[in-house]
Amino acid sequence: MPIFDLSDKSPSLLGRVVAVDTRRVTINVEPARLPHARVGKLVAIRTANPVEEWLIAMVDRVQRALAEPDRRDKDAKESPGPSGTTVLEREINSVVVVLVGSVCARKGTKTNVFSRSFIDVPDIDAWCYALEDKELQRFMGLLSKEAASTKALDLGVYTLDPKATAYVDGDKFFQRHAALLGSTGSGKSWTVATILERAKELPSANVVVFDLHGEYSSLSYASHLRVAGPDDIGKTDSTLLYLPYWLLNSEELQAMFIDRSEFSAHNQVMVFQDQVLASKRRKLEAIKKNDVISALTINAPVPFGIDEVMAALKELNEEKEQGERGMKQGKFFGQFSRLLVRMGAKLGDKRYGFMFQGPPDLQKYEALHGIASQLMDWTEKNHRIKVIDFSEVPADVLSVIVGLVARLIYQVQFWTPQASRVPVALVCDEAHLYLPQRSETDAPERRALENFERIAKEGRKYGVALLVVSQRPSDVSDTILSQCNNFLALRLTNGADQAKVKGLMPDSLEGFMDMLPVLDIGEALIVGDAVLLPSRVRITAPSENDRPRSATIEFWSEWARTGRTPALVQAVENMRRQSRRSS
């Protein structure tokens, strides 16, 4: 059976090729056949290959022009002119298409094989056909069949043919990083939930969701961790995530405590690092971990006493030494006063309790084993999908803490023996908040950004993938987005965001991406290594009971309701307690 049942008598005939330029092909179309050409529609072009082969293209531009013909031109028509005269005109209609792949009737032992590559380009005067009705269904069915395998990720259906399931290659989607971009209300959280629903069915799935607003707390199939809030201090609930300060590396600790604008900042950095390293060494000596001591560095995640460090800094800050005429100020006298005030404020602030006021067991050497298990163990029930709620983390350290968790996961994965390594995917929701452009970053944000940039560049080698989710792609780091080889672009209405996404695409897809502002809610343009061809897809809705709590509030409908009373007292008390949960 031929791939397509198309001939010069077919009603879907568009016209003949009149120009070829690498991937762009221009087709001359008769006026009566122009309605068959619409932007985004698929076109089949017959090649001269003796084995039946068709080039598949996507309509990029439709043009109609009028020219003054010769009187002998049989296609010329008379049209009304000025002052009751008539003019002779001839329509010249052209359709520009972009080649996206080829279908070959036979390739080795396989039949009707679609490939994103093509060797031949169309000949001049080659016949071109719009893929419609049964031919479109046959081709979309071929795509679905080609993509349907054990590694297929079912996202929805093709907009061109709702009967054909839209699959992406699950391996390529995650191993080469992906970005999910769309304006508020376009369906980002919905799409994330659909992907998570598919992943939870895999017996060894390992996905960690960075949830900044508690949107995914309703997912019944996930294990939920929440960074401990002020009213959780002292509790040891297994769903609470404490991130003790000794997990921070040297630069993150400096960003937490040291103001680089101070005149004595260089001395603060030097002495602070020395005291931290000394405290870590004493801790290891006390438990006789000589093998760790021999490789100890300032960045090693080893517990140390922050009180010890403060006491040593205070002693140096007040130290006096013998001079020729009596006691005089020591070398560092008064240089650490502001640093000590900042450290005292942070240590006593319950908003930072998840770092400085955790249970005593977090100061034990074995504490990191338990934290790693919380973040990365996928063997227990509901542990394949893990949602970490960062909603109560103070905004001034949010980027540092998110970056810390990402770095910790990456480092554990890095040091896991290759034979035991199970890939892990990090879903970075609201990425623009902690992965901004470098020119806009301050010191803490730079630390987080560097952690994620390293994962973006090297994570594939160690089984760490990123799914970057953002409503403002123009604000997200170019370095990270440039490492993403797959894009799910939902509706984008902001010009800067559209330009950013288009800039990440090949020039040949510029017309395809022009559809971004007119996509429906839950519709996406999918481009990248994981799909057989760039496609417009309607994403399948997640289960009714497992939808994220991110729906836009219906203002007018809420205002129309009666019997409502403001919960102002509860709101004020929640603000004082720094928690939205009932006391």
Image: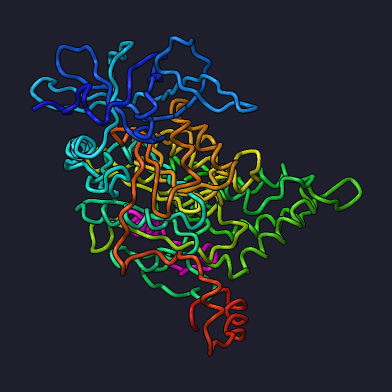
On screen, 290 above or below 12? below
Protein image colouring: rainbow
On screen, 105 above or below 463? above
The residue furthest right is 325
On screen, 64 above or below 428? above
In the rendered view, does 431 fall on the left or right side of 99? right
State the residue in front, 512 or 71: 71
The spot of residue 481 in percent (x, y) is: 48, 37
What is the quadrant of residue 208 in the picture? bottom left
Residue 378 among those drawn in magenta: no
State the residue in front, 501 or 244: 501
Residue 361 among those drawn in magenta: yes
The spot of residue 14 in percent (x, y) is: 32, 26
The residue furthest front is 84
The spot of residue 23 in percent (x, y) is: 39, 19
**x 18%, y 22%: residue:** 104
In the rendered view, does 341 fall on the left or right side of 527? right
The residue furthest bottom is 563
Q: How many marks?
A: 0
State the residue in front, 281 or 346: 346
Magenta stretch, main secondary structure class: helix
**x 45%, y 18%: residue:** 76
**x 34%, y 50%: residue:** 538
Q: The magenta stretch spans which residues?
A: 354-376
Q: Can you say which quadrant of the picture contains the N terminus?
A: top left
The spot of residue 245 in percent (x, y) is: 53, 57
State the residue in front, 11 or 309: 11
On screen, 406 above or below 185? above
